[in-house]
């Protein structure tokens, strides 16, 4: 299965990396590499992770990566990464189509 990133997910990942880079640029690069590697595992195991508790939709799942949630939707031929959220940030249901 192919893994595709929404513009929102890319933007959220960039915001998180920028925040991390303020303290440690090397750690930020390592975090981004790890984030994309974790999301890439969904190509082999698309239903990895748990259902998003706030939604309880069978097609929307989350994979935890450190203190972040990688929220994805399993579709017929791909896994769409919808957003990336810090665990402490309130989940915005409007981000999920």
Image: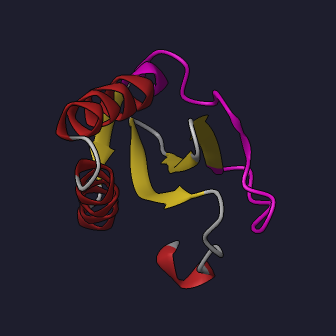
Residue 97 seen in this snapshot: no
Identify the colour scheme used.
Answer: secondary structure
Image quarter of the N terminus:
top left
- Residue extent of the magenta highlight: 40-60
- Taking 31 as reference, is 94 above or below it? below
Residue 63 shows in the view: yes
Q: On the picture, is 71 further left or further right than 22?
A: right
**Residue 41: within the magenta?**
yes
Outermost residue on the bottom side: it is: 94
Residue 51 shown left or right of residue 69 in the figure? right
Above or below 42: residue 95: below
Q: Position of residue 43 (x, y in %)?
A: 41, 23
Decide which of 13, 82 is in the foreground and name it. Answer: 13
Instruction: Name which residue lies at 52% across and 72% down.
Output: 96
In-image side of 53 versus 45 (left or right): right
Name the residue located 62 percent from the left edge and 79 percent from the top edge.
Answer: 93
Residue drawn at x 20%, y 31% is 26
> Picture quarter containing residue 63?
top right
The secondary structure that most of the magenta stretch takes on is loop
Compared with 86, 41 (above or below) is above
The quadrant in which residue 83 appears is bottom left
Q: Find the residue positioned furthest to the front.
A: 23
Picture residue at 43% right of the left edge, 58% below the top? 82
């Amino acid at each position: 299965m192919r893994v595709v990133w929404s513009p929102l997910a890319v933007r959220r990942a960039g915001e998180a990396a920028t925040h991390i880079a303020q303290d440690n640029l090397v750690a930020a690069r390592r975090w981004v590499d790890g984030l994309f590697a974790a999301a890439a595992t969904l190509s082999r195991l698309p239903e990895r992770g748990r259902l998003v508790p706030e939604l309880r939709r069978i097609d929307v799942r989350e994979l935890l990566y450190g203190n972040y949630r990688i929220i994805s939707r399993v579709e017929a031929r791909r896994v769409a990464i919808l957003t990336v959220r810090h665990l402490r940030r309130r989940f915005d249901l409007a981000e999920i189509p």
